[in-house]
Amino acid sequence: MMRCGSFCPNLRDRIQPWLRDYDRLQSFAIILIYIQIGCALIGSLGALYNGVLLVNLAIALFALVAIESSSQSLGRTYAFLLFCAVLLDISWFILFSHEIWNISTEDYTTFFIFSVKLTLAMQIIGFIVRLSSSLLWIQIYRLGASYVDAASREAEFDLRNSFLSPATPAVVRQCSSSNEILGGSIYDPAYYSSLFEDGQENKYLYGVC
């Protein structure tokens, strides 16, 4: 009892920082996607009932594209497809799992039965991985949302400080980053005045800037 009581808090202390690490969770989620791809490829070797595995393979490949492109719209689409895949797995189990498990050895060969049961086994593993992946993506979304909220609060805090002390380093840093995004020295008077040919107008614009 003492060992179990001391082991459980230590395990919880190790898991909680890992669940709060965005990069580690995303890396593990990608590993789960590769496991789903492997299960779908192996299960597609079955002689029958392998259509759902091909659908899961397409969804897993789409997930890799969504992650590599870092597109929010593709990410939301993958979340919807993952939910549909879980429902499809449940429907597939209800319709075909009992029939596959009790397949008759008199009507089919041994290799045929082995391939079909291999499809069932890969589907079970893929379903468990997809459920784990869905919970993992929910945690990743929560961490991402909290990170965005913290960044927005920090930006608002910097803006409040700018009213008190306009020359704070945060405001200067924001101005420099915005200039780089807008094209470097687009607000530089020398660069701005080079767009005009009249020297008098250039001096006037320089004074206005």
Image (tube, rainbow, N blue to C red):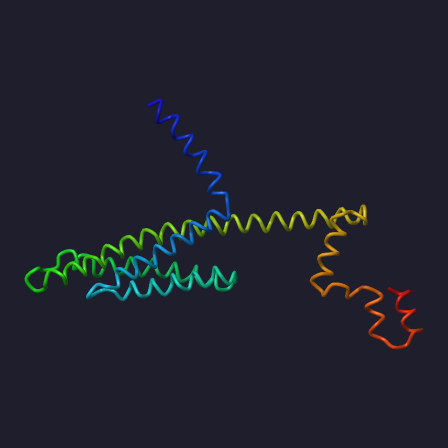
Quadrant (top left, top right, bottom left, bottom right) of the C terminus: bottom right
Point out residue 151 in the picture as x, y percentages from the top left corner: 63, 49
Judged from this view, the residue extending furthest toward the top is 2
Relative image position of residue 166 (x, y in whole percent) = 81, 49
Q: Is residue 153 above or below residue 6?
A: below
Question: Compared to 172, does 58 lie above or below?
Answer: below
The residue furthest bottom is 197
Residue at 22% in and 57% down: 120
Q: Residue furthest left?
A: 106
Image-quadrant location for residue 181: bottom right
* Residue 145 spot, x, y in % from top left: 55, 51
Left or right relative to 34: residue 205: right
Nearer the observer, 120 or 97:
120
Task: Identify whether 197 is placed above or below 159.
Answer: below
Observer-nearest of 172 and 72: 172
Residue depicted at 37% across the width and 61% down the height: 84
Question: Whole-percent x and y of residue 197?
Answer: 87, 77
Pick the quarter of the image with the N terminus: top left
**Number of callouts:** 0
Which quadrant holds residue 207?
bottom right
Using residue 153 as the reference point, say whether residue 110 is left or right of it.
left
Residue depicted at 85% across the width and 75% down the height: 196
From the viewer's perspective, is 140 left or right of 163?
left
